[in-house]
Amino acid sequence: MPSYKLIYFNLEGRGEILRYLFSYSNIDFEDRRVEFADWPALKPTIPYGQLPVVEIDGVIYNQSLAIGRYLAKKAGLTGKSELDEIRVDALIDTIDDFFSKFPWMDTEKAKKEFMEKSSPQLLAYLEKTLGNNPWFVGDSATWADFFWDTCADSFESYVPGFAKDYPKLLALKERVKAIPTIAAWIKKRPKKIPVKH
């Protein structure tokens, strides 16, 4: 059995999808949380100077979505066919595009304005894709559902209620969080650092 170590900051962000995937599959992993004060010394040792990374049997791998895809395949969360995989990847890329554009380090006002201007298009697309189905793709959960939940939690911590007009997407988040292994992770995970607005 390989040994896994996730290295990320003490927050959810891009690391939480990996924690969900490890937890869903009951894979033991070391959850190393880097304090911001320690980051400058660690940064030169990390590929491209970016977190998260995952160390597998002593070898470091970078890029959260590449690692996520690897873990999702191991867990059977990439869809039931190659065409499902395309749909899952497209959803993840769409959400990630938005995640990457979000003004994380900007003012509270800038974050709110960004969400008011930019989120309706994303949310309408996601809710239309979901339709009346329990999951985005097929009749069972995929990591696209997990990714929506973790990213939405990050947005929510900065702009509360950003998806309040999209009940189907909110219900999807509840379904993800109700998966027993995910619920167990959420219950035991360390408290994240408070968001400064």
Image (spheres, rainbow, N blue to C red):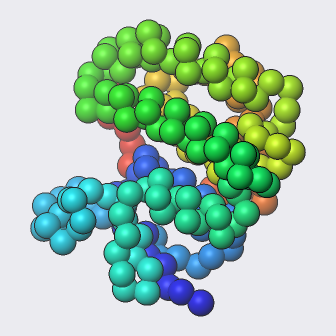
Q: Which picture quadrant has residue 25? A: bottom right
Quadrant for residue 6, please give it. Answer: bottom left
Q: Quick one: quadrant of the N terminus?
A: bottom right
Q: In this view, does 72 lie above or below 192?
A: below
Reply above or below: 109 against 140: above
Q: Is residue 89 left or right of residue 119?
A: right
**Please, which residue is most extreme toward the bottom here?**
1
Asked which quadrant contains residue 125, the reply is top right
- 131 up-or-down from 95: above or below: above
**Residue found at x 27% / y 22%:** 107
Q: Can residue 189 be seen in this view?
A: no
For the point 45% across and 15% down, which residue is it? Answer: 118
Q: Which of 28 and 122 is in front in this view?
A: 122
Q: Is residue 136 visible in this depiction of the protein?
A: yes
Number of numbered markers: 0
Across and down, in percent, residue 54 comes to 41, 70
What percent of the width, then of the height, locates residue 137? 76, 41
Residue 95 in the image: state x and y as whole percent: 52, 34
Q: In which quarter of the image is the C terminus?
A: top left
Q: Residue at x 48, y 79 (%)?
A: 4
Q: Is 162 displayed left or right of 186 in the figure?
A: left
Which residue, as the protein is rendered here, is positioned at the far front?
Answer: 82
Residue 82 location (% of width, % of height): 71, 52
Residue at the location (50% across, 85% down)? 3
